[in-house]
Image (tube, rainbow, N blue to C red):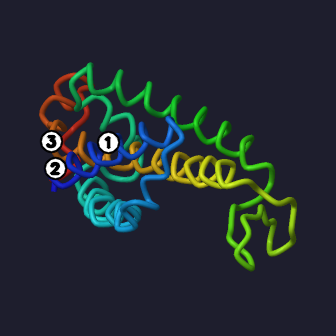
């Protein structure tokens, strides 16, 4: 499962970086949206296994203590980046979604026309939309990958002195 999460993270990173440069990779490769479904493929097993192993209380604290410090630092930076990316994504949507209506590029809010778009504006809005989603994909894939690839229950117990919650 860790390898799947790592692959999902790397592909999401490529998608995200291209979106930051204004490229709507989903227009070229529509299957890219499979990454959205893929987060559930790794997140559901992560959720069940981590709850079984860590319990419900202090789970995040135990998870953090069972990871190498560099993973915690990268994860913390990624959480901050994801929040900032989401806020910027929302700011750049102008309250609408790009669409094609009657052969014209438009910005819609729940079906209501906000304004007409040029082809380049439409592409920029679609790239922004992809950037918003891929920023979240990065976080989900990273957390799951960190757990499956790096988390060690013995490390958390030794550092924190918690009893083995799995037994």
Q: Position of residue 47 (x, y in %)?
A: 33, 59
Residue picked out by circle 2? 2
Say if mark 3 contacts mark 2, CB within 8 Å. Answer: yes
Question: On the picture, is 151 further left or further right than 64?
Answer: left
Q: Determine the secondary structure under disc 1.
A: helix
Badge 2 or badge 1: first in the primary sequence: 2
Residue at 51% over, 30% down: 81
Residue picked out by circle 3? 149
Mark carried by residue 69 = none
Whether residue 5 is situated above or below residue 16 in the rendered picture: below
Q: Label 2 to label 1, Cα distance in Å?
A: 10 Å
Whether residue 153 is situated above or below residue 93 in the rendered picture: above
Q: Is residue 83 visible?
A: yes
Asked whether 78 or 51 is in front, the reply is 78
Mark carried by residue 142 = 1
Q: Position of residue 131 (x, y in %)?
A: 52, 46
Q: Residues within 10 Å of mark 3 (few under 14, many from 20)?
A: some
Q: Is residue 37 visible?
A: no
Q: Quadrant of residue 49?
A: bottom left
Q: Residues within 10 Å of mark 2 (few under 14, many from 20)?
A: some
Residue at 33% over, 59% down: 43
Q: Label 3 to label 2, Cα distance in Å?
A: 5 Å
Question: On the picture, is 57 further left or further right than 147?
Answer: right
Q: Determine the secondary structure under disc 2.
A: helix
Q: Position of residue 39 (x, y in %)?
A: 35, 60
Badge 3 or badge 2: first in the primary sequence: 2
């Amino acid at each position: 499962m860790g390898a799947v999460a790592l692959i999902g993270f790397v592909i999401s990173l490529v998608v995200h970086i291209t979106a930051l440069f204004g490229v709507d990779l989903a227009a070229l490769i529509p299957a890219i949206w499979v990454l959205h479904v893929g987060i559930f493929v790794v997140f559901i097993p992560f959720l069940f296994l981590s709850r079984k192993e860590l319990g419900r209380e202090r789970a995040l604290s135990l998870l953090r203590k069972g990871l190498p410090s560099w993973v915690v630092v990268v994860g913390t930076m990624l959480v901050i980046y994801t929040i900032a990316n989401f806020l910027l994504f929302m700011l750049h949507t102008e309250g609408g979604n790009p669409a094609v209506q009657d052969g014209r590029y438009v910005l819609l809010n729940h079906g209501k026309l906000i304004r007409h778009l040029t082809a380049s504006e439409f592409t920029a809005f679609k790239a922004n939309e992809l950037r918003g989603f891929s920023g979240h994909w990065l976080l989900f894939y990273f957390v799951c990958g960190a757990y499956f690839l790096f988390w060690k229950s013995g490390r958390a117990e030794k550092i924190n002195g918690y009893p083995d919650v799995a037994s």
